[in-house]
Image (cartoon, rainbow, N blue to C red):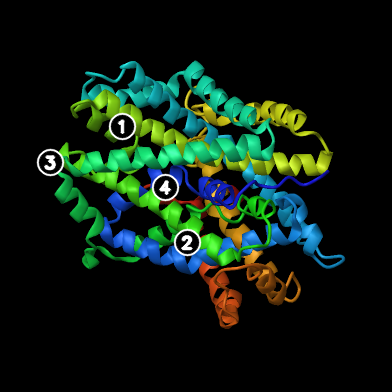
Amino acid sequence: MEREKLGSRLGFILLSAGCAIGCGNVWKFPWMCGQYGGGAFVLIYLLFLLIIGLPVMIMEFSVGRASQASVIKCYQNLEKPNQKWHYHGIAAFMGNVLLMMFYTSVAGWILYYFVSFLKGDMTGITNTQSEALFGSMLSNVPVMVGFMAIVVVLGFAILCFSLQKGLERITKYMMILMLILMIVLAVRGFWLEGAKEGLIFYLKPDFREINGNVIVGAMNQSFFTLSLGIGSMAIFGSYIGKDRTLIGESINILVLDTSVALMAGLIIFPACFTFDVEAGAGPSLLFVAMAKVFNNMAGGRIWGSLFFLFMFFAAMSTVLAVFENILACVREITGWKRVKACIICCAAMLILSLPCALGYNVLKDFHPFNSSSAILDLEDFLVSNCLLPLGSLVYIIFCTSKKGWGFDNFLNEANTGNGPKVARCLRPYFTYVLPLIIVFVFVMGIIGYEFADNFTILNWIKGLIK
């Protein structure tokens, strides 16, 4: 099967950034920032993006470009005879599938809120009704399954076209529109009465707020926002040529990804301080809190529609990118044409996404961790706290160990082309320090993952053993 190629460098940057940009940027980052002290969290988050996210991204791109294959085949093209690195390719493929099993439902929530604002269903509702709306959405089976299905079908319908005419073209338009919407919404926020207080909270670090929880939270967010470790980036590395070095391309993607996260805060925090909405409201900040904001804002129907359209573009960019990764793996294994693979993968993803969509209604009595947890929490935990850090650790060891691909091979691939180079003097950091940081992230994500007061995943595992 002849390997498809992207049509332009811009397409590669926007596709890769689109994979990284998603709910982690525009949903999770703002509420974590609100809970962890604002500017202090942002400062530490940016630091960890540079020392963790950037090196792992370069490695994942290098493996993809050198192998010219999807994650399920890339190790087979680079590993030495009788080595077993390709087992991670299978785990990474499963990680992409598991990610989409719950991500499609979250994208469906965002689409539902966009449609509701656009139709005017949100106009004039009280704060109490705004809080009840989210719960009623979760309990409504046709809404949950229907909007999830729209996301899945729309995603694979776009991918039915060739790589350049489908994924690359649509993502370019969608990302450009998303950036324009972000700027419009951020400028609107600057004119709100509480903009000054919101921006001070968001952008001025208060070093008294820095503690262990802030550091660990920023470390986890900086790591997980880029979706590294399951080959979501490697696939786009396999679609590009060797005319540019990979550190330069990775920096461009990192800057674009970070800009979206920071812009989301510029949109949300001035509005929170203007309309007296708790900035540290947690995961409900996007849906419940922002619905309250737009209901109290002049022209709220229009601004709410634009906000959730921007959110949907962000979520959909990740859906398309990960669907393409899944599709590439399936096509390499089966040899199917793109359209046939899209139809079969679409049907499979609709079925696999049902447990999450039904987890708050039909399957609401299934609680994997505590009485308030749902299937989404289990799927998210397995991806975010297990597969992403462990997968990144595998990439690091593979790229730096003599028993893997080796640091010299990695360095040659990363530095091929025009642009900045990875310095050889960084080898000790890549080989020894970075793996220790990733292990720390993984361990803290396991033992510190709280599901209820005084309850952690460690206690849950102990309970299973007993």
Task: Indicate the secondary structure of the residue bearing disc 2.
Answer: helix
Task: Indicate the secondary structure of the residue bearing disc 1.
Answer: helix
Q: CA distance from mark 2 to mark 3?
A: 40 Å
First in sequence, mark 1 or 3: give its number. Answer: 3
First in sequence, mark 1 or 2: give its number. Answer: 1
Q: Using the image, tell me which numbered label, if any, was put on residue 288.
A: 1
Reading the image, the residue beneath label 3 is 193
Contact (Cβ within 8 Å) of mark 3 with mark 4 = no
Contact (Cβ within 8 Å) of mark 2 with mark 3 = no
Query: Quick one: label 2, few (<14), some, or many (20+) residues within 10 Å?
Result: some
Q: CA distance from mark 1 to mark 2?
A: 29 Å
Reading the image, the residue beneath label 2 is 444
Reading the image, the residue beneath label 4 is 25
Residue at 60% across, 79% down: 427
Q: Residue furthest left?
A: 193
First in sequence, mark 3 or 4: give its number. Answer: 4
Q: Quadrant of residue 77?
A: bottom right
Q: Amino acid at mark 4?
A: Asn
Please state which of residues 348 and 444 is positioned toward the viewer in this rendering: 348
Q: Amino acid at mark 2?
A: Met
First in sequence, mark 1 or 4: give its number. Answer: 4
